[in-house]
Image (spheres, helix red, strand yellow):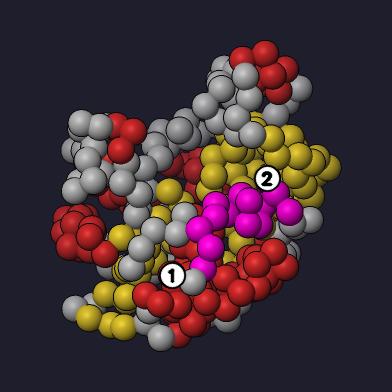
Amino acid sequence: MDKRIIPLIMCGGAGTRLWPASREVRPKQFLPLFGTRSTFQDTLLRVSETSLFDRPIVITNASYRFMVLEQLAEIGIEADVILEPMRRDSGPAIAAGAVFAQNRASEAIVLALAADHVVQDNAGFVAACRQGLTAASAGRIVTFGVKPERPATEYGYISPGEVISGEVHAVARFVEKPDAVKAADYVNSGYLWNSGNFMFPASVLLDEYRKVDAASVEAISNAVTNAGRDLGFVTLEPEAFGAAKAISIDYAVMEKTARAAVVPVSCGWS
């Protein structure tokens, strides 16, 4: 398969749960918490194999724009940097990235990744992306389900359904963060941790989002269409972007679409 994936790196969060190491002015995704590089930098390097991945898109808060450029330069990677004028949760952020990617390539396949995750086995991650690309190219919205190491209560879970292709399954059920008893039952029943990272055709993601909230998708599209460009940054039009409802991508799309699929991964993803 010669189609390449466009990585969409989401790094606009404040990271306040790791206070005081992570602060509003320098959140955790920009800190070298697990080595000499930040998790933002490691995420970008993880999707730098040019035979599989295209030029990345970074979507971040305007306050972090120069930090993003500095960290990109440190690892020698170039990216399109989109600035959110205000935070609107993962739904509008991912939709804005999808619109931007679709403007670049009408049949774009996008991989939306959180910038603060840790993956210990990069080869395993890339293999999972190749599996996901096959399903996404067939019109699926693919999430990555981590094989549980314990009955964790801090993650949502995914119940895999029928096999679609290779190791990719349809999603039978998404469940919220459970208590300890339910978590143990989910692990014993073969459920996966929901990593909150997705691969999708940009057009399919936007179509499914429209079924839930067409007005927000229109506002987000207008924010991209009327975006400003300054010092190499793409600044979403504030009034239009601000009109989109703040909502997570899980609630906006994943828990409602019939196109959801899951790739089980065991590459030390956390």
Q: Which region shows up in magenta?
A: 244-256
> In the image, what residue type sits under mark 1?
Gly
Residue drawn at x 36%, y 42% is: 116
Question: CA separation, marks 2 and 1?
Answer: 31 Å
Write down the quadrant of residue 212 in the picture.
bottom right
Mark 2, other Cα within 10 Å: few <14 / some 14–19 / many ≥20: many
Q: Quickly name the residue at label 1.
A: 242
Q: Secondary structure at mark 1?
A: helix
The image shows residue 254 at horizontal and vertical percentages of 67, 52
* Residue 171 relative to residue 226: left or right: right
Secondary structure found at label 2? strand
Residue 121: x and y in percent read 44, 35
Does the magenta segment cover residue 245?
yes
- Can residue 204 be seen at all in this image of the molecule? no
Give coordinates of residue 162: x percent, y percent: 83, 42
Identified at 20% across, 32% down, the residue is 21
Q: Earlier in the sequence, mark 2 or mark 1?
A: 1
Q: Residue 154: in sight, yes or no?
A: yes
Q: Is 176 one of the magenta-colored residues?
A: no
Query: In the image shown, does 94 or 248 lie closer to the viewer?
Result: 248
Question: How many neighbours does mark 1 have within 10 angstroms: few (below 14), some (14-19), or many (20 or more)?
Answer: many
Q: Establish if 176 lies above or below 7.
A: above
Q: Quadrant of the C terminus?
A: top left
Q: Amino acid at mark 2?
A: Val
Q: Position of residue 185 (x, y in %)?
A: 72, 17
- Left or right? Give the position of 268 relative to 61: right
Circle 2 residue: 262
Residue found at x 59% / y 44% = 144
Instruction: Say left or right for 1 vs 62.
Output: right
Q: Is 99 rendered above or below residue 113?
A: below
Tell which residue pokes out farthest to the right in this image: 162
